[in-house]
Amino acid sequence: MSEHQQDKYSKWSSTVDDEVLKKKQSFGFMLKKRKDELLRSWKSNVAISTAWKCMRAWGTSTYDGDERKDVVQYRHAWAKRMMAYKEYMSEFTRENEEIEVSPLLSENQKKLVMVTHDESTFYAHGGKVDVWLEENESHTRKKGQGRVLMVGEFQCACHGTMRVKGWVSCKIFNVGAAYEGYWTSEDMFDQLKKHAIPLFESLHEGCTDALVASRMVLKSKLVTENDKFHFKEIAFLRDGCIILQSFYETVTEAGRKGKGPIEKRQFIGVQRILQERGLWIELDISNLSRKWRIDCNREEAENHCFCARHLLAFQPDFAGQKTAIQEIVEVPGHIFELYPKFHCECNWIERYWGAAKRVARLNCDYSFKSLEKNLPSLLDGASPVTGPPTMIRRFYKKTWRYIEAYSKFLDAKDADAEVKKFTSRISKSHRSIGIHD
């Protein structure tokens, strides 16, 4: 029996009105129990949609594990790193976000561009849930969701979907055993290596390469504009001390007649790198009559000393174990970051999917042929082929508000409130500026 019946209609009752049940289903209870356990605790056949309606009516909220201790620790550290990266990224401004403001960088600093990835599915029968009908009109929907197309997308805020002369970073996949099969990690690796990374490097000049010994030469070499790979300064441990090591040095050459000396930058070479680490070997251990080689052209041996490249590649700063996708991203010199678990609000592409699916639902005619024909244009509506990707840049800016909130160690609920300060404008009086502007 409920504690009171004030303002309750006596001839019918609702689950929402059950005060005892309301107290039982507290926010803490939701964190401990899964949805099916919640339904069993109600001892009735309650639909999931009804359960959520009751929880919202009671003013409770659900956060799917995003306040777990390990998730919070990773989220805070990740947000701090992202805010440090942001100093090297462009900002977007004006009414349509059409103006790109580049960061102020010193001579040795490079601009960073955030690229995000996600996959989503579009169904042939994915129309609107509610429809308007005349009094005697009936409408029977097709059963099931119909055939499906999956979209894998890499985006940057500068261009939205990255494009170069008809070559795009977006891939549409016809899902099904009778069609193109099912999307796997290999498909994503292929898209990343053959499309996303080359397109990114074509659109954004100036990338820093990772530590790949096979791309290094033995002797010192002057840096030219045609050099494809560049290597960053690193640190290694020697005799218990951390030593910084740069792969480049400045050399002075005599200028032409009548001109002074010219300073140039050169790569120091694998031999110098190993000598500074106390690892250089003069003679080939397998044949002492000849000098040690830069490359032995065979598989790495257990002692890693057959050639200079194998020995260097075995050093901890070169041989750190990484995931397959991390290696694909970092080998060309890019930075790899994983979003925190349970935090889709930190990925602006989720809002891009929402915008594209809204248009898809409005134009759904329940045929796969129509979906297949119209899907590219539906995606282009959210990320246009020409002009600035206004919608993408607005989603991008909102994402950074969440990241900034999490970098201040706010929890998910407080972060939502912080972001709403920018999205909910409250005017003090008629024709006045909003208090959050």
Image (cartoon, rainbow, N blue to C red):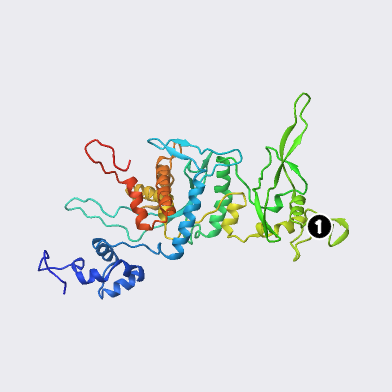
Which residue does the image show at 55% across and 42% down from the upper left?
A: 111
User: Left of 433 or right of it: where is 343?
Assistant: right
Instruction: Say which amino acid is labelled 1.
Output: Ile
Residue 313 location (% of width, % of height):
70, 57
Residue 5 location (% of width, % of height):
12, 68
Which residue does the image show at 33% across and 47% down from the upper left?
A: 421
Residue 182 location (% of width, % of height):
49, 60
In front of the other: 5 or 136: 5
User: Left of 431 or right of it: where is 74?
Assistant: right
In front of the other: 107 or 299: 107
Q: Label 1: how many residues lie within 10 Å, few (<14), some (14-19) or many (20+)?
A: some
Quadrant in the picture for residue 107: top right
Residue on which disc 1 sits:
281
Q: Is residue 364 visible?
A: no
* Residue closest to the far left: 10
Residue 60 location (% of width, % of height):
28, 62
User: Left of 178 or right of it: where is 332?
Assistant: right
In front of the other: 214 or 2: 2
- Quarter holding the N terminus is bottom left
In front of the other: 338 or 145: 338
**Which secondary structure, mark 1?**
loop
Q: Is residue 347 above or below residue 259?
A: below
Q: Is residue 354 above or below residue 181?
A: above
- Quarter holding the C terminus is top left
Q: Is residue 40 visible?
A: yes
Which residue does the image show at 29% across and 75% down from the upper left?
A: 40
User: Left of 324 or right of it: where is 182?
Assistant: left
